Structure formats: structure tokens, C-alpha cells
Image (spheres, grey):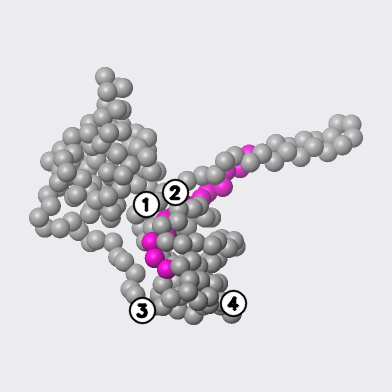
Amino acid sequence: MFAVIKTGGKQYRVAKDDVFTVEKLDGESGDEIRFAEVLMMGGETVTIGAPMIDGAAVVAEVVEQMRGPKVISFVKRRRKHSSQRRRGHRQQLTKVRITDILADGASVAPATKAAAPAANVTAPSNLMSEAPADADDLKKLSGVGPKLEGTLHEIGVYTFAQIAEWTADDVAYMDEKLSFKGRIDREDWIGQAKTFVAEAE
């Protein structure tokens, strides 16, 4: 089954598990987003909207917030003593993964973030109450930007050494706390953290 959606003024043909980039959307890694502007759906039968299909939706998960390649704009005016200008630009993009295509999206409530970790999962024992003097730049980890780094600081994570010591239970706690859905393991944060710790020694 496939669908044609519209976002950021562009159209995309998508199917379940497709990963692609679109114009920047609000959300952090692991967040669920919905594309309600569905122009066409196909499978055994094809449905074409007029211009949109009422009630249809495409559900996706934010993989990461990223920036596109640098584009150079160069303007030079002819004639003697003319001016010239050179500018660079990198477009803000969001990488998403399609998780579901719904013919009747209104009938399924969107997933919500977990309000708190499960009662049987305890917080990592090495969380800190305040930032240490030797706090690391957590943005070096895959998929961690300024906003996510701030969230980790609020929880009490400031150094790569802390992450390198996490157990499976610690990862489960952080996954639920941040609604990461296994992303810590997928991105191998612990392996990256151990590498950064070794490089610093």
C-alpha cells in the first residue's frame, strides 16, 4: 500500500517503513507525527482525493533533525567597479520513517508520550543533581542536538562516562523517560560514549 502526501509545499510517494527527508517539522527524535494532507492512496484499489482524501492520514516517526548540504548563492554584476555577493545556506530538514498508512486516520487516536517511566524500571544510579565542572558536549552523540542535550541535563545526564556505565535497565528507563523507542540502542550511545571516554584519557 502506498500514499501520496503533501508537506512543505512538496509531494511525496510513501510506503510503510520508507525513510526520507522533508522540510523541517516540529518534534524530537522518536516523536510521532501525522500527515493529514493525503492526495492519493493505492493498493488493491486506488483512491484519489479532491484534492485531499477525507479522514486519511499517514503516520511517521521523527528519526532526526538535520541540515541539508550547503548551497552557495553567488551574484556578480557586470561593469567596472561592480559589486559581488557570496552567501551560503543550509536548509533545515527532518528525517522521518513511515510507520502506518491509515485510510481513516481520525478513527485512531495518535500515540502520546509516556508521562513517566514504568514503576518497575528505576532511574540510573549515576544521575547528577547539578552540572559538574567537566561536563561533556553530549551533542557529539548521534541525533543529539541542543534541545535534547538540555533535556538530558534536566534528567541529570552530563557526561559520556555516565552513559558508558548504563545497564540494560538504565537504557529502558531512559527510553521510556524520553519516548525513544529503542533509539539509544539503535544509535549505540553507550558504544559512542565509551569511545569518547577512551579518547579523553
**In the image shown, does 20 or 91 lie closer to the viewer?**
20
- Looking at the image, is mark 1 or mark 3 earlier in the sequence? 1
Are the two marked residues, 1 and 2, in contact with CB atoms closer than 8 angstroms?
yes
Disc 2 residue type (three-letter) = Gln
- Looking at the image, is mark 4 or mark 3 earlier in the sequence? 4
Q: Which residues are magenta?
A: 87-101
> Mark 1: which secondary structure?
loop
Q: Which mark is residue 29?
A: 1
Q: CA distance from mark 2 to mark 3?
A: 29 Å
- Looking at the image, is mark 1 or mark 2 earlier in the sequence? 1
- At a point 53% along the width and 77% down the height, the residue shown is 47
- Residue 138 position, x and y percent, is 33, 37
Q: Which residue is mark 3?
A: 107
- At a point 50% along the width and 67% down the height, the residue shown is 3
> Mark 2: which secondary structure?
strand
Nearer to us of marks 4 and 2 is: 4
Residue that sits furthest to the top in the current view: 201
Quadrant assignment, res 196: top left
> Mark 4: which secondary structure?
loop
Q: CA distance from mark 1 to mark 2?
A: 7 Å
Disc 3 residue type (three-letter) = Ser
Disc 4 residue type (three-letter) = Pro
Q: Which residue is mark 2?
A: 65
Q: CA distance from mark 4 to mark 1?
A: 31 Å
Q: Which residue is mark 4?
A: 51
Q: Is residue 9 above or below residue 24?
A: below
Q: Quadrant of the C terminus?
A: top left
**Residue 74 visible here:** yes
Quadrant assignment, res 189: top left
